[in-house]
Amino acid sequence: MDVIRSGQSGSASGVLPLLLGHHWIRIAYEGAIMLRSHDPLVGVPALANLLRGQYAAITARGRHAAKLLDDTNKSYDQVLTELEEVLADHHARLTGRAARWLRWAETDLALYTLDGKVAGASVSAGYRLGVELADGGRIAGYDIRAVSEEWGATLAVLGAAALDGSSQPATLGSIRTFGHGHRDRLATRYLRSRFDLEFGLGLKAMLLLIEGDLNTSLRLLPLTSSGHEQPVFRAQAITAYHALTALRQVCQRHAGSRTAGLQGLRAALSGPAAERLLSRPGKRVRNRCMHYAIADPQVRPDPSRPMFGLVETVFPGTSWHDYQADVLATTSRLADVLGGWRADK
C-alpha cells in the first residue's frame, strides 16, 4: 500500500503496476486465503466477509502465472505457447497500420529499464496480468479498472487485519523520482539477437520476463524497503526461487547444447548460493515467503527475529541475513548471465 500511495504522484506511477503488479496479486490472493481460514488463530471472519470475490478467478490466474514453471496446472510447453500467443496478439494489434514504406519502423514490444538494464516488458506484464489487446486492453474480458479496484480493496482489508490503518501515509519518497527508461522495439527483431539462436520466441519471451524480474528485484525493490524490509525479502526470495527453477528446466531441456549462454547459465545454477536456495530447506523458505498461514507444525515463530525466525527454523544453521545474502548474490549472478546473453555468442 505504501508503494502504491508513494508512487501515485510521481513519474513512475504507470510503470510500477507493470513491474510489481504480480507481487500485489500474490499478496491479495494469499492474504484472502489467510483471512478466510477456519483456524481461529489465523482467520478473521469479520474482515473476510468484507472481501469481494467477483474476480477471484482472475486473481488466482495472475498468482499462478507469477510462479512461472512452478505452476502445477501448466506444463513447460503450455507456458511457452501462451507467451507466443501474447507476442502474436501484440504484433497483430500494434503493427500493420503504418504506410507500407514505414512499416519497418513499427514496434510491438515496450521495454522498461532501470539503470540501463531490462526491468520489464509489455509482453511480460500482458501475460501475467491477463491483458488482452485483442479485447480492447481488458483483463480476460473484464474492465481493467474494476479488477484493479477489487485488488486494491483486498489490500485495504488486509491492512486492517495487520492493524495497519488505511490512512497510512506515503513514506517512500524515492519511488516518486526513481529513474527508469522506456524504449519500443519490434519483438521478432529484438528477440532474434537475444539468447540462443535455436530458442523459439516463447522461450525467449520467458527468459526476457525472468531477466526483468531479476533486475526489478535488484534495482526497484530495495527502493521500497525502508520500513518494509521483510515484505521486500519475501518478494526477492520468491523471485529468485522461481527464476532458478524455471532456468533449471531450460537447462534440462537443452542438456545437449554447449553454447556460451547455456554454459554460463549452468555455472550460475551450480553455485553454492543457488544450490542452497534450490535445496529442500530452500523450498521451505520459499513456501513461508509465499504463503501467510503457517501449516508446518515444526515452524515455531520467534517474534524477536527477522521474519519471525522462519529462516532459522526451516534452515538450521543459516541466519536470515545469510539467506538474504544468498538471494541477492544469486539474483545478481543470474541477471548478469541473462543480460549478457546474445545469440551471436
Image: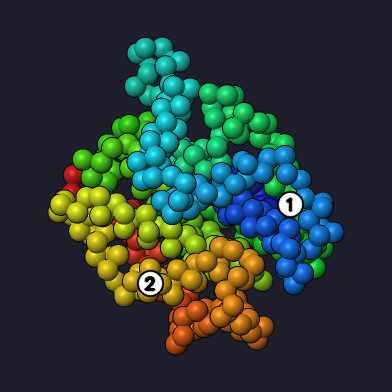
Q: Residue at x 59, y 63 (%)?
A: 291
Quarter of the image that includes the N terminus:
bottom right
Whether residue 118 is visible to the viewer of this picture, yes or no, is: no
Q: Where does residue 32 sit, x and y in percent of width and height? A: 70, 55
Q: Name, please, the residue furthest toward the right.
A: 46
Q: Nearer the viewer, residue 60 or 147?
A: 60
Residue situated in front as seen by the camera: 130 or 46: 46
Q: How is the image coloured?
A: rainbow
Q: Secondary structure at mark 1?
A: helix
Question: Which residue appears at 34% of the width and 22% of the height?
Answer: 104
Determine whether label 1 and label 2 are within 8 Å by CB: no
The residue carrying pointer 1 sits among few (fewer than 14), some (14 to 19) or many (20 or more) residues within 10 Å by Cα, namely: many
Count the numbered circles shown: 2
Q: Residue at x 66, y 49 (%)?
A: 10
**Coordinates of residue 298 in the picture (x, y in percent):** 56, 80
Give me the disc on residue 279: 2
| Residue type, label 2 | Ser
Left or right: 179 in relation to 322? right
Query: Mark 1 sits on what residue?
Result: 154
Q: Residue at x 66, y 71 (%)?
A: 227
- The CA distance from mark 1 to mark 2 is 33 Å
The tag on residue 308 is none
Label 1 sits on what residue type?
Thr
